[in-house]
């Protein structure tokens, strides 16, 4: 599966989730901004970045990479005005993580999506943010 295909999966599942939960979903005209969606409910507008992984270890890279040699050019954590990170793992389970929680949790360049608390207490506690569609 290509990165473009994974991106489409993450974006479409986020649109589905927010629509089912009564949000108006707006899509930007291009893909050069630091968010993928704008959502609105009850007059409150929020921004969402979508990520999807197909790796066995369910690692989500918080950096954006591109170009011919895959250089990193941005990081989700650089955008404190971002509201949510919407993640989809290799089993198509979804996680909705407030950016402020990532910042307070000392996340770096990646997080690992897990369904339960790590035995050693290490890593960002993604299990808290598992959602159902």
Image (cartoon, grey):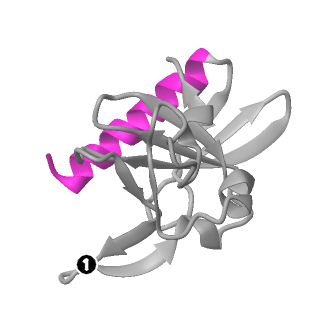
Q: Number of marks in the image? A: 1
**Pointer 1 local density, CA inside 10 Å: few below 14, some 14–19, many at least 20:** few
Magenta stretch, main secondary structure, is helix
Residue 103's x, y, as percent? 70, 63
- Asked whether, in this view, residue 58 is left or right of residue 78, the answer is left
Task: Please indicate, yes or no, whether residue 26 appears anywhere in the rendered image.
Answer: no
Q: Secondary structure at mark 1?
A: loop
Kindly identify which residue carries mark 1. 70
For the point 73% across and 45% down, the residue is 46
- Magenta residues? 1-20
**Above or below — where is 95 with respect to 85?**
above
- Asked whether, in this view, residue 78 is left or right of residue 4, the answer is right
Nearer the observer, 65 or 94: 94
For the point 61% across and 67% down, the residue is 77
Q: Quadrant of residue 73?
A: bottom left
Residue 28's x, y, as percent? 53, 52
For the point 59% across and 44% down, the residue is 125
Q: Quadrant of residue 25?
A: top right
Residue 111's x, y, as percent? 47, 55
- Asked whether, in this view, residue 21 is left or right of residue 56, the answer is right
Q: Residue furthest right?
A: 43
Nearer the observer, 22 or 93: 93
């Amino acid at each position: 599966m290509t990165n473009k295909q994974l991106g489409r999966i993450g974006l479409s599942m986020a649109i589905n989730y927010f629509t089912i939960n009564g949000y108006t979903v707006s899509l930007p005209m291009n893909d050069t901004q630091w968010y993928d969606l704008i959502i609105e409910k009850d007059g409150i507008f929020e921004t969402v970045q979508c990520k999807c992984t197909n790796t066995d270890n369910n690692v989500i890279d918080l950096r954006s990479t591109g170009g011919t040699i895959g250089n990193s050019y941005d990081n989700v954590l650089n955008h404190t005005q971002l509201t949510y990170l919407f993640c989809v793992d290799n089993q198509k389970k979804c996680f909705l993580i407030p950016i402020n929680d990532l910042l307070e949790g000392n996340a770096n360049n990646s997080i690992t999506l897990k369904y339960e608390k790590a035995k050693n207490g290490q890593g960002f506690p993604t299990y808290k943010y598992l959602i159902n569609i």
